[in-house]
Structures are given as C-alpha cells and as structure tokens.
Image (tube, helix red, strand yellow):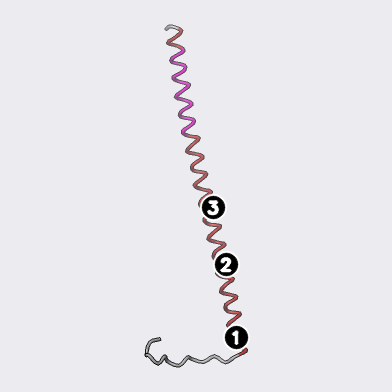
Amino acid sequence: MSRAAKFTLGAAIFSSAFIVWGVHHLQMTERETMYQGIVKDDARRRDKMKQREEELQRSIEKRELYERVQSVSNPAPHPSGST
C-alpha cells in the first residue's frame, strides 16, 4: 500500500471518528438544553402555583376582614331579570 493511500485512509478514519464524536456531542448538548428547559418550566409552574396560593390566602383574609366589619347578605335580583 502506498504512502498516499495510507494517508488517505487515515484521514478518512480520523474524519469519520471526528464527525461521529461531533454529532454525539451536539446531541448530548441538545438533550441537556431541553432538560434544563423542563427544569425551568417546573420552577416557573411551582412559582406560579405558590403565587396563586398566596393570592387566594390574601383574598380569604380580606373576605374574613370585610365580613367582620360589615354584614353580608344575598344581593337583590337585578331589575332586568339577568344576573
């Protein structure tokens, strides 16, 4: 086998190995990026639920305060017949 043929074969093997490694590396990077997106979405969802629970608690406390300060009764029906 000639020197040029050996060099060409070596270059082809090296290039193929580098391409396979590069594709694998890109896939791993993309997978990690997608996973981090899921982690961030979960954190945002937890924060939003916590915020909603806090708002509900504040609303309950306001209602209790208002009910202590003033009497609450069922509203009279609207004159037009719709509610």
Residue that label 1 marks? 66
Give the label, 1 or 3, closer to the camera.
1
Identify which amino acid the numbered label 3 is placed on.
Val
Check disc 3 and report its element: helix, strand or loop. helix
- Mark closest to the chain's N terminus, 1 or 2: 2
Q: Is residue 5 left or right of residue 73?
A: left
Tell me where the magenta segment starts and ends, as one range: 7-23
C-beta proximity under 8 Å, tags 1 and 2: no
**Distance from label 2 to label 3 (Cα)?**
18 Å
Most distant residue in the left direction:
81
Residue shown at 51%/50% (left/top)?
37
Rendered position, 63 above or below 33: below
4 vs 69, nearest the viewer: 69
Identify which amino acid the numbered label 2 is placed on.
Gln
- x, y percentage for residue 61? 61, 79
Residue shown at 49%/31% (left/top)?
22
Identify which amino acid the numbered label 1 is placed on.
Tyr
C-beta proximity under 8 Å, tags 1 and 3: no
Q: Is residue 30 magenta?
A: no
- x, y percentage for residue 47? 57, 62
Rendered position, 4 above or below 66: above
78 vs 65, nearest the viewer: 78
Give the label, 2 or 3, closer to the camera.
2
Residue shown at 46%/12% (left/top)?
7
